[in-house]
Image (tube, rainbow, N blue to C red):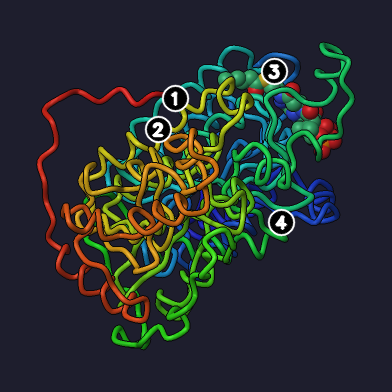
């Protein structure tokens, strides 16, 4: 019979053993690759001393391929709860030192347990991913384990924020759970995501590609849009995750806290007085406008490197947390195309799900023309953004700074799809299309007088007054009062509540 002290020692020893994961040698290897261990990551990400671990002594029950001889306490994933900026969160962190972080049934059950806990208690869930995918020795049980996680990702979607950090190779099943979460963070040079790796690709398609080019942080942030944040290293990643948490609530029912700021809401935006160029073909950087109107110039841009013709991100105005969607005239003239439509649609849906008001800044010449776009399905992809805005019930404030042409005018949170407040600068041009294009069509037989016709069209349509006459624009404002007005309207919309249709769910054009 063990004494009390011996039992205490037993717990201490087992705990220490669990904390070593796959052992000292593999921990060294992990460090050599510029990666922290699963446990170090939790401790660096969460508030100090806040982590409480679940299931520290769980082990697998697999007897195939000699697995019964190798058991790591915790089975290669660390799960539990803790805090970020004082906000309760649930977390799992995959331990690459145990079978390359590969997922078996016991491991999957640990993740499912912590996800269930998060959903039942309405707290965000963070997954730190570093895994070779399905644990090959466990066969179909690994696949079953993945599917149970995927199912929970879907049940939690829109109820609690789900955040994925990719901090190593993520192959096969390891990519699909992150893909169903709200935000994916990747780390430069050490994180990869692919469904099938370079070796398989070479065998099947004879294509040769490095794993970085195939699924590195650069690729998924710039090309595929799979990832939302690209971080320099793991420390940078933890910093950015904590920053994100300062803008989002713990669940869809949680009332937002005010963001602390000393930035005056009546501060005049003098910089914006003549910010929009006289020449409507001249680009300008919409980031500058955003930074001028938000609190403390603090803008957390989402999908910064992807589809740069639209800007999405979080900020606050007078302490009220908002999502910002803005056309970017400095890139592809700010037009809408497939990638920008999908990027913005997903962002709008996140904000709507978590009750974050959306400010839309419009300077859009229309949809990008061309066969690449049409064959790629711009019709159904553009429809996603239209759908997302139309179903959104959060406060929607739209400001047209310059162009709002054609279908893109309708899509970008127009009055007609139930934006609450639609503002325009005196420089706004709200029309079916730009003057040149319009004149080439309606005055096709009068090209001799093109200059005169362009001028006449511009006088009639290249302004916000037609729309204002019809009440499609609620107020035309001088740019210098932008911040003050946005704050006043955000306050006025604070208690917005509108009914939604009685239906199981809509059918967004996927
Ligand atoms: C079991 C695995 C494993 C796996 C890696 N290991 N992947 N064990 N199942 N899937 C083990 C290795 O045997 C090794 O064990 C340790 O993890 C580290 O792996 P290394 O290869 O030495 O590391 P590295 O060179 O860094 O390469 C990492 C890697 C590579 C890129 C992840 O291991 C790899 O390609 N693994 C296989 C990836 C894969 O094809 N997964 C299955 C996908 S199918 P020791 O004992 O030496 O430390 C899938 C289906 C799910 O996931 C579908 C759901 C929809």
Which percent across, then down, holds residue 365? 49, 47
Query: Of circles 3 and 2, which is in front?
Result: 2
Mark 2 in CB contact with mark 4 (< 8 angstroms) = no
Q: Earlier in the sequence, mark 3 or mark 2?
A: 3
- Which residue is label 2 attached to? 384
Rendered image: mark on residue 414: none
Q: Are the residues at dot 1 and dot 2 in contact (C-beta closer than 8 Å)?
A: yes
Considering depth in this image, is 266 or 109 the residue closer to the camera?
Answer: 266
Secondary structure found at label 2: helix
Q: Position of residue 374 (x, y in %)?
A: 55, 23
Task: Please name whichever residue, 410 or 193, is drawn nearer the observer in this view of the structure.
Answer: 410
Label 1 to label 2, Cα distance in Å? 7 Å
In this view, 61 is above or below 160: above
Q: Which residue is mark 3?
A: 137
Name the residue beneath numbered marker 1.
Answer: 380
What residue would you read off at disc 4? 36
Q: Distance between the Cα atoms at labels 2 and 4?
A: 39 Å
């Amino acid at each position: 019979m063990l004494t009390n002290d011996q039992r205490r020692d037993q717990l201490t020893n087992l705990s220490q053993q669990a904390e070593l994961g796959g052992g000292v040698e593999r921990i060294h290897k992990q460090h050599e690759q510029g990666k922290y261990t699963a446990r170090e990551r939790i401790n660096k990400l969460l508030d100090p001393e806040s982590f409480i671990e679940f299931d520290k002594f769980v082990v697998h029950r697999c007897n195939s391929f000699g697995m019964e001889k190798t058991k790591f306490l915790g089975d290669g994933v660390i799960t539990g709860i803790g805090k970020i900026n004082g906000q309760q969160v649930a977390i799992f962190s995959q331990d690459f030192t145990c079978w390359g972080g590969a997922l078996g049934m016991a491991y999957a059950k640990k993740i499912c347990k912590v996800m269930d806990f998060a959903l039942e208690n309405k707290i965000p869930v963070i997954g730190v991913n570093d895994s070779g995918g399905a644990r090959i020795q466990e066969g179909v049980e690994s696949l079953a384990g993945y599917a149970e996680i995927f199912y929970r990702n879907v049940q939690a979607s829109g109820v609690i924020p789900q955040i994925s950090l990719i901090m190593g190779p993520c192959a096969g099943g390891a990519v699909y759970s992150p893909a169903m979460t709200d935000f994916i963070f990747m780390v430069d040079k050490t994180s990869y995501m692919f469904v099938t790796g370079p070796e398989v690709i070479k065998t099947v398609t004879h294509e040769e590609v490095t794993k970085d080019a195939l699924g590195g942080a650069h690729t998924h942030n710039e090309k595929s849009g799979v990832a939302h944040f690209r971080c320099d290293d793991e420390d940078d990643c933890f910093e950015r995750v904590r920053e994100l948490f300062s803008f989002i609530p713990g669940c869809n029912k949680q009332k937002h806290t005010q963001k602390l700021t000393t930035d005056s809401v009546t501060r005049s935006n003098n910089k914006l007085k003549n910010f929009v160029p006289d020449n409507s073909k001249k680009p300008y950087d919409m980031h500058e406008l955003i930074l001028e109107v938000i609190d403390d110039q603090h803008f957390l841009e989402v999908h910064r490197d992807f589809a740069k013709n639209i800007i999405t991100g979080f900020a606050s105005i007078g302490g009220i947390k908002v999502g910002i969607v803005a056309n970017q005239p400095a890139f592809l003239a700010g037009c809408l195309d497939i990638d920008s439509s999908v990027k913005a649609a997903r962002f709008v849906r996140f904000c709507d799900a978590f009750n974050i008001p959306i400010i839309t800044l419009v300077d859009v010449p229309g949809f990008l023309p061309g066969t690449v776009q049409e064959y790629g399905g711009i019709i159904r992809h553009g429809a996603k953004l239209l759908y997302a805005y139309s179903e959104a019930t959060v406060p929607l404030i739209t400001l047209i700074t310059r162009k709002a042409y054609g279908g893109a005018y309708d899509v970008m949170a127009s009055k007609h799809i139930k934006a609450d407040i639609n503002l325009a600068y005196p420089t706004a041009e709200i029309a079916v299309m730009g003057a040149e294009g319009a004149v080439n069509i309606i005055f096709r037989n009068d090209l001799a007088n093109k200059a005169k016709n362009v001028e006449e069209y511009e006088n009639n349509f290249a302004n916000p007054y037609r729309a204002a006459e019809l009440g499609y624009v609620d107020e035309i404002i001088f740019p210098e009062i932008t911040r003050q007005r946005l704050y006043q309207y955000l306050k006025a919309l604070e208690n917005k509540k509108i009914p939604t249709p009685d239906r199981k769910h809509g059918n967004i054009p996927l």
